[in-house]
Image (cartoon, helix red, strand yellow):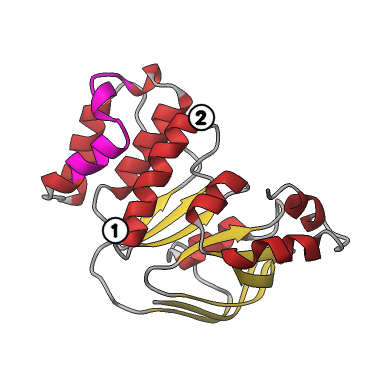
Amino acid sequence: MLQLNNIIYKNKNKMILNGISAEVKQGDSICLFGPNGAGKSTLLKMLAGLIEPDQGVYKQDKLTSKPVGYIPQQLALFPNMTVKDHLSFYKKMTKQKDREFIEAMSNALSLNEIKKKKVEELSGGMARKLNLAVGLIHEPDIIFLDEAFVGVDLAAKHDMLQWLRLLNEDGVTIVLITHDWHVIHHLAKTLWVLEDGRMVDQFSIENLPQKAEEYKLVDSPLNKMFAVQN
């Protein structure tokens, strides 16, 4: 579905991604994990096709005509618009005609309960759920999430995870960035570990306990990050 081969990416002569090789297959649920400045957000944007590498090969199989779903950390919402108006606006903009999908998503994320509220009246968790909904309203086959769970309370997190897991079970591919181990345990199938722009590890979530013990012996920021995984 998506392939990266020996990717190099620089910003003002600073190496951001250094020799990244990886593959994303349909139905995957991958978490990009690592310390700040490791290159996670840059790699996510590259996988989403938003930026191009300076060197190396990026290949995207044309499996769908739908645009990808990209949910950034920054909210893509209008403060004075209601929840209902947001869904209507993005529905028209993306030419989405599947009312059943939008209704199912609204119910799963508990948006119908707050549809008359303006964004400026929403809690952080409610706003995050709406931000997720507008990013998925066109029913994408692959979803990219950059710290989409920041500041989300447990109830909102539960709704978001439940909906994303349902989509993934239906074959939707997910690539996300998060430091939240609750999210990782409940959504990710695979971890890609990045440090200083390099891919230092890739492993199944089933191997996390063993890997966490190994990283406790590593002299790097990853030591403390894996120490709190459970």
Q: Nearer the viewer, residue 134 or 113?
A: 113
Q: Is residue 191 visible?
A: no
Quick check: 157 above or below 218? above
Q: Alpha carbon of mark 2 to alpha carbon of mark 1: how far?
A: 26 Å
In the rendered image, residue 221, in percent from the top left (x then y), is placed at 81, 54
* Helix, strand or loop status at disc 1: loop
> Which amino acid type is marked by label 1?
Pro
Q: Nearer the viewer, mark 2 or mark 1?
A: 2
Q: Residue at x 70, y 51 (%)?
A: 36
Q: Residue 153: which numbered mark, if any?
A: 2
The residue at 54%/45% (across/down) is: 147
Mark 2 surroundings: few (<14), some (14-19) or many (≥20) residues within 10 A: some
Is residue 217 found left or right of 147 in the rendered image? right
Amino acid bearing label 2: Asp
Region rendered in magenta:
102-118
Query: Is 219 located above or below residue 115 in the figure?
Result: below
Query: Where residue 188 sits in the image (x, y, percent)?
Result: 51, 58
Q: Residue at x 21, y 50 (%)?
A: 94
- Residue 6 falls within the magenta-colored stretch: no
- The N terminus, quarter of image: bottom left
Residue at label 1? 140
Please indicate, yes or no, whether residue 152 appears anywhere in the rendered image: yes
Report crowding for label 1: few under 14, some 14 to 19, many 20 or more residues within 10 A (C-alpha). some
The front one of 218 and 15 is 218
